[in-house]
Image (tube, rainbow, N blue to C red):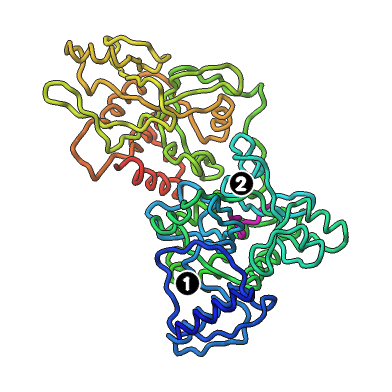
Amino acid sequence: MKQALLLLVCTAHTLGMIPSIPFHRLSSQRVPSRVQVVLRGADEMDWREMRARLVAQERASNSSTPLTSDSNSYVYETPLIEQGTILLGGTKMDFGFALRQQFFHKSVMLLLQHDDTFTKGIILNRPSALEVDGWRVWCGHGQVAEGGMFVGDDKKMGDLEINALHSLTGFLADKMSIPVIKGVSYMTLEGARALVKAGVAEKSDFWICVGYSGWAPGQLQMEVEKRDSWYLASADSGTLLKELLREARELPPPGDSAISIDQCCGIDTWSNLMRGIGREADALQSKGTLEDKMLEQWVRVHLLPKKPSQLPPAAMLPPKIELGTVLSTMVSPESSLPADRVLIHEQFLHKALLLVLSAQEDGPDGKLSACILNRPTANRMRFNLPGSPQHRIPFCGNLALSNEVWLHHRPELGGVALGDSGVRILSSVEVVKKLKTDEATAHDFFYVSSVVQFTQSEVAGMLEAQEMSRITPGEELSGLWPRVWSLMKDDGDKKNLNDGTGVWWLASQFGKGEQLAGAVVSDIADEALAEWLKFFASG
């Protein structure tokens, strides 16, 4: 039977009945063992349909369920990466999409291009509240070519690219389109406008997708084989368009901003396709995870209407943040969430204690560099001193310093004072001298090799929104430094790393008198911080 199938397929290919489609074969491909093939003209069935029928025949041969041959729709899991393959966001990665690239979580992506030079795909299940010329915009990007439409001009990656997905046929549509699979093509937004103007299409015939995701040669294969980042599926146009139409019907009309977070997440579409490829159990097991919650927050920040800026008028701005200012990040009592930057991108800033090391410029765009003081890691440094003392290396920020510095809180050791914080800076050369002359011990110093940056206006906005507070200098703050420094002592415990939130809470009580004040709780922010610590601080 296998030999007969091979001869039949080769003959059909030679006669031009099956078009040649380049594809990338993964090592896990399994060839069906029992098949029956009925060849039809190329206008009725392409190679994908034939392969789908082979898979269906194989399923039928291994199942008591009879094969229903009267259905022309199909969706099945495939080992192939090729143009038209559907990527379904995976759920089994060790490091998933909770802390980074949340837009990929449970995404449904269609590969528009796959060849030896590049792979390009667009996300299909992320509608947004944004519009272009009366068309609802769908977020098709993986941070490529979205032109700042969703993430802002300061974070955009590449110029704006818009692809209009459709199932139109006819002379004009065929001439202006690039086919993906049988029955699904795409064109530029300008092309879609032209077809609507010519009266041969309506706006509702198109899905306007902004941006795309891109992979270098071999990169996507590695993500599938090594990381379990994606499930691969093959579907016909009927199945794919049915899901897109269902999504579109459930959305409010363009111009109506009442679109919900759940609708923008598109998880129902992902779940339906997962069910179609026999992965319903995986979909159910991953329901309600941190990744689901973080996707909802990413959608809230990037795909829904933007809230007015929290920055107060210039006359009401808080005093300029100076060198040596101590800041504490916190959860806003209004939203029960930390700042968007903290929750979505920099979870290490949740419940962080910050010391400003430099304030470079005046004005709202002036840059502030601060080090995080309460994020010890499992990494250690060993001093070349008697007894070989060890010291935990703190995570102080995501921007590396060209020259590391050392902090201390003993005035007699000298150094440059950081405002009225009670902390001073010494260079590495000066620290070595102090250690060699026994003027200080290794535990007198706090090692800083990186910082995090803000602008004056950003800090002002966070202070106004109560997402950050300023710690008043004085006796209480001076008494805090020994506790902060003690976080970096190596106690030999490699499993139970201090998360630093204890000293953060203590600092939040300064100025409250004898009555302790409870901090606003954000479960999702706490969970995201714990996830960050697990992957980046625990070693």
User: Helix or strand or loop: what does disc 1 sit on?
Assistant: helix
Residue 71, by quadrant, is bottom right
Q: Residues within 10 Å of mark 2 (few under 14, many from 20)?
A: some
Which residue extends farthest left? 387
Q: Is residue 453 left or right of residue 128?
A: left
Please tell me whether residue 394 belongs to the stretch shown in magenta.
Answer: no
Which residue extends farthest right? 198
Segment colored magenta: 121-129
**Residue at (43%, 24%) from the top-left corner?**
326
From the viewer's perspective, is the residue at label 2 or at label 1 nearer?
1
- Image spot of residue 377 (x, y percent): 30, 37
> Is residue 52 something that shows in the picture?
no
Name the residue type under label 1: Glu
Task: Relative to 323, say whether 489 is above or below.
Answer: below
**Residue at (43%, 71%) from the top-left corner?**
281
- The residue singled out by tag 2 in the image is 302
Please tell me whether residue 128 belongs to the stretch shown in magenta.
Answer: yes
- The residue singled out by tag 1 in the image is 280
Q: State the separation of the CA atoms marked 2 and 1.
A: 29 Å
**Residue at (62%, 70%) from the top-left corner?**
19
Q: Nearer the viewer, residue 444 or 429?
A: 429
Task: Relative to 508, say whether 105 is above or below.
Answer: below
Disc 2, disc 1: CB below 8 Å? no
**Residue at (37%, 54%) from the top-left corner?**
94
Q: Nearer the viewer, residue 155 or 353?
A: 155
User: Helix or strand or loop: what does disc 2 sit on?
Assistant: helix
Q: Residues within 10 Å of mark 1 (few under 14, many from 20)?
A: some
